């Protein structure tokens, strides 16, 4: 029972427990799959915590990928030296982006573009600030969320290469549409969808437009892209891991390092009610949304903002106030719901870490 803590009576629930020793081991396993720290650009959206960035920096990781300006600033302040904001910026976000570029001159910042309007607005602000910036072209090779199709990206790359205020740092290829559990099938899907990207890269080279970095994939395709030495790898979830990926990607061996802590708060009509509502646990997917550790559940009866009601074969053995542990099925949005998390060392909660990156920027 690696997850059990000796000072349960001192811990507020619902909450999340983090285990730094397991996080460190997961970072080591990420590096082993990549082959070298220089190939990693891990996504910080999973954890959103300065201390986790620092644990990665301590093992030699310098490049990071973020989804928000707050995550980007947190990463820069925590030791990251090459940070990609993998999200398009418009409106006041452009000015905020350039303010961070100036605030942290020792950091190489870059941002995504996938259209000429975005290029034009970034260029206008770069000229105004007299500050050149790097950009990655966001490539859509099957996800159909953001990005430009590889066949249409050549013209955009040419426009950027001729722009004195923008540096074409690379291509960003997120293939989050690939979910096959079987590694061989997943690899075939990934490589088939990547063929158009390789053709684009070759066409750019033929016209002397160099692409310095291919920032590729997420967690599902991490081990696939790892086999191609010219690709940078962008996993996020492995640093904390969760019950969903443990089941969906059996070929990846990472340790659960984040546990949901809760308590029994009532026992209505032979059911069991926990304090594990939507406000604590990611609820964007169907049940089961969590995997209890050493507690069998028959069915989920009700899940609302503050409550989780279940049927359990051993309900009679549970009592109001009992402490329970569970793995979230989706860790990233679960962490985003927390202002702070507990830190567990040697089987005891010893402090808290703030989830800095969950904040939004408002005027």
Image (cartoon, rainbow, N blue to C red):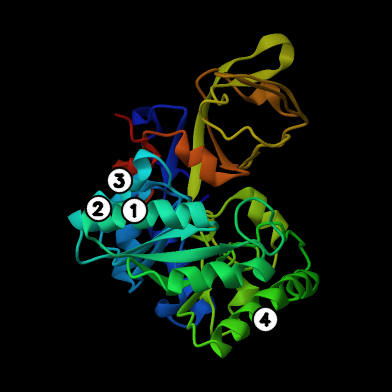
Task: Give the percent coordinates (x, y) of residue 136.
Answer: 47, 66
Q: What is the C-alpha distance between the residues marked 3 and 4? A: 35 Å
Q: Residue at x 20, y 59 (%)?
A: 104
Task: Return the disc, 4 or 2, that comes first in the chain's sequence.
Answer: 2
Q: Does residue 124 appear to the left or right of 106 in the view shown?
A: right
How packed is label 4: few (under 14 Cα within 10 Å), some, or many (20 or more)? few
Task: Return the disc, 3 or 4, that comes first in the chain's sequence.
Answer: 3
Q: Nearer the viewer, residue 185 or 156?
A: 156
Give residue 128's mark: 2
Q: What is the C-alpha distance between the residues marked 1 and 3? A: 10 Å
For mark 4, give the secondary structure. helix
Task: Return the disc, 1 or 4, that comes first in the chain's sequence.
Answer: 1
Q: Residue at x 65, y 75 (%)?
A: 197
Q: What is the C-alpha distance between the residues marked 2 and 1? A: 6 Å
Can residue 253 be seen at all in this image of the molecule? yes
For mark 3, give the secondary structure. helix
Q: Mark 3 sits on what residue?
A: 95
Q: Residue at x 65, y 25 (%)?
A: 317
Q: Mark 1 sits on what residue?
A: 124
For mark 1, give the secondary structure. helix
Task: Return the disc, 1 or 3, that comes first in the chain's sequence.
Answer: 3
Q: Is residue 181 above or below residue 330?
A: below
Give residue 199's mark: 4
Q: What is the C-alpha distance between the residues marked 1 and 4? A: 31 Å
């Amino acid at each position: 029972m690696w997850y059990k803590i000796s000072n349960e009576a001192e811990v507020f629930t619902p909450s999340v427990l983090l285990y730094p020793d397991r996080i460190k081991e997961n970072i080591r396993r990420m590096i082993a799959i990549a082959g070298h720290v220089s190939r990693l650009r891990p996504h910080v959206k999973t954890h959103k915590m300065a201390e986790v960035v620092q644990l990665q920096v301590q093992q030699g990781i310098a490049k990071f990928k973020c989804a928000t300006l707050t995550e980007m600033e947190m990463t820069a302040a925590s030791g990251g030296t090459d940070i990609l904001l993998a999200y398009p910026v418009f409106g006041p976000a452009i000015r905020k982006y350039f303010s961070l570029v100036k605030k942290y001159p020792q950091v190489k910042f870059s941002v995504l573009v996938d259209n000429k309007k975005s290029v034009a607005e970034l260029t206008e602000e770069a000229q105004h600030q007299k500050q050149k910036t790097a950009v990655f072209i966001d490539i859509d090779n099957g996800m159909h969320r953001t990005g430009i199709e590889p066949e249409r990206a050549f013209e955009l790359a040419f426009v950027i290469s001729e722009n004195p205020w923008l540096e074409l740092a690379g291509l960003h290829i997120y293939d989050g549409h690939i979910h096959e559990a079987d590694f061989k099938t997943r690899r075939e899907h990934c490589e088939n969808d990547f063929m158009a990207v390789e053709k684009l890269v070759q066409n750019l080279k033929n016209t002397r437009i160099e692409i310095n970095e291919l920032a590729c994939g997420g967690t599902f395709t991490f081990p696939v892209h790892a086999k191609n030495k010219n690709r940078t790898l962008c996993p996020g979830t492995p640093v904390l891991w969760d019950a969903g990926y443990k089941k969906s990607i059996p070929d990846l061996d990472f340790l659960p390092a984040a546990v949901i802590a809760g308590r029994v708060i009532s026992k209505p009509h032979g059911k069991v009610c926990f304090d594990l509502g939507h406000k604590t646990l990611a609820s964007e997917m169907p049940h089961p949304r969590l995997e209890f550790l050493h507690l069998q559940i028959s069915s989920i009866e009700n899940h609302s903002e503050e409550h989780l009601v279940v049927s359990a074969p051993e309900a009679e053995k549970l009592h109001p106030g009992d402490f329970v542990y569970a793995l979230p099925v989706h860790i990233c949005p679960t962490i985003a719901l927390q202002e702070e998390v507990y830190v567990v060392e040697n089987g005891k909660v010893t402090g808290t870490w703030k989830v800095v990156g969950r904040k939004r920027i408002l005027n």
